[in-house]
């Protein structure tokens, strides 16, 4: 029977340890992969290296506790200890890292969104209160200047709410691979044609039509965000270059390049984080919400593609999207 029990426990993906006293009598393959194959017959203090784990084992009762750093630094695990006989216990280990990370990210997102909305709202309320004062409200020049500020802050809130809704819609379908057909070359030309100064953005392509399985609306939003960013932050007098290259290997690359001051290396890994800005004051002055690149990243991931940003100080920035041409 013990041999059969061991065989059954070995089929379970959850790390499981069986203890006799404080010694590991059995560890299934999942536990060995997590803690090392050497843990057989090892003291529980050496196997788990956590005072809370040892305390729970020595308590003589069933229970559970949280362990940190069991697999990698920052990981969170739940340990459950069950009494299965005299001086015998069964320990199961459950990885909670993803759940904790998602909960933390959700809390951070709500806090950041609240802060981003609070700032313009506070400004609007402040200027409205000021305009109620006859000294300011009755002066046409002051009133006009304050109303312009209120209008700008209201538009900033409108843009932020719009981006938040876009991000929410994209995340709701992020696991659904698009099945509609879209022409990326036509989308790029349409987005560039929306610019009021066409000479500002140059477009090069090695193929007039590049059809792929994609959501045309989302792809247009991604291209628009990147072109707008390049125009806003790449002011150098050299304009922006958009290049589209389809390969025979089933991939298409869309690269948007500006020739501005570039981005410092320490910022590059975090550019697609929600609300992350390299220069908060400048971004807000340009009307940025801090969500544009996060939206691009989610759209590209939904289309099973790759998104990369490279930059050199003083030479500009290149944002590159790579998408598979045939996904069906």
Image: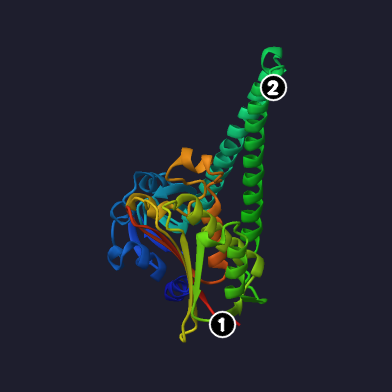
What residue appears at the point 57 percent right and 74 percent down from the top-left corner? 185
Left or right of 180? Residue 297 is left
Query: Which secondary structure lies at badge 2?
Result: helix
Could you say where residue 159 lies in the image, as x and y percent from the top left?
A: 63, 46
Q: Which mark is residue 195?
A: none
What residue appears at the point 41 percent right and 68 percent down from the top-left corner? 30
Left or right of 147? Residue 295 is left
- Confirm whether residue 16 shows in the render: yes
What residue appears at the point 67 percent right and 29 percent down from the top-left corner? 147
Q: Do the residues under discs 2 and 1 have CB atoms within 8 angstroms? A: no
Could you say where residue 273 lies in the image, as x and y percent from the top left?
A: 48, 51
- Confirm whether residue 83 shows in the render: no
Identify the image's colour scheme: rainbow, by chain, secondary structure or one colour.
Answer: rainbow
Residue 257 or 307: which is nearer the viewer?
A: 257
Q: Which residue corresponds to mark 2?
A: 140
- Label 1: few (<14), some or many (≥20) within 10 Å? few
Q: Nearer the viewer, mark 2 or mark 1?
A: 2
Residue farthest to the bottom? 248
Residue 86 or 221: which is nearer the viewer?
A: 221
What residue appears at the point 37 percent right and 51 percent down from the top-left corner? 261
Could you say where residue 266 lies in the image, as x and y percent from the top left?
A: 34, 50
Q: Which mark is residue 326?
A: 1
Instruction: Give above or below for 126 relative to 120.
Output: above
**Quadrant, the C terminus:** bottom right
């Amino acid at each position: 029977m013990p041999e059969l029990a061991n065989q059954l426990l070995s089929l379970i993906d959850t790390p499981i340890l069986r203890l006799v006293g404080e010694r590991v009598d059995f560890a299934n393959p999942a536990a060995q992969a997590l803690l090392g194959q050497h843990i057989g017959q090892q003291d529980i203090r050496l196997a788990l290296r956590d005072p809370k784990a040892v305390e729970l084992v020595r308590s003589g009762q069933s229970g559970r506790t949280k362990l940190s750093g069991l697999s990698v630094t920052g990981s969170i695990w739940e340990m459950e200890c069950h009494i299965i006989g005299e001086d015998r216990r069964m320990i199961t280990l459950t990885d909670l890292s993803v759940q904790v990370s998602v909960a933390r990210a959700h809390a951070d997102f709500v806090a950041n969104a609240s802060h981003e909305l609070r700032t313009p709202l506070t400004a609007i309320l402040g200027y409205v209160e000021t305009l109620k004062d006859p000294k300011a409200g009755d002066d046409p020049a002051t009133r006009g200047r304050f109303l312009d500020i209120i209008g700008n802050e209201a538009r900033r809130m409108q843009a932020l709410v719009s981006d938040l809704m876009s991000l929410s819609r994209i995340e709701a379908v992020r696991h659904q691979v698009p099945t509609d057909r879209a022409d990326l070359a036509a989308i790029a030309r349409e987005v560039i044609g929306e610019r009021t100064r066409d000479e500002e953005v140059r477009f090069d392509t090695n193929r007039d039509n590049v059809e792929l399985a994609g959501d045309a609306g989302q792809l247009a939003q991604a291209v628009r965000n990147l072109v707008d960013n390049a125009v806003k932050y790449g002011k150098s007098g050299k304009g922006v270059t958009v290049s589209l290259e389809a390969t025979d290997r089933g991939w298409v690359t869309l690269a948007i390049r500006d020739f501005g001051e570039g981005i410092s290396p320490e910022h590059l890994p975090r550019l697609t984080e929600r609300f992350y800005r390299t220069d908060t004051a400048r971004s807000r002055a340009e009307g940025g919400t801090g969500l544009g690149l996060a939206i691009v990243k989610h759209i590209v991931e939904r289309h099973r593609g790759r998104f990369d940003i490279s930059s050199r100080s003083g030479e500009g920035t290149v944002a590159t999207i790579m998408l598979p041409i045939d996904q069906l």
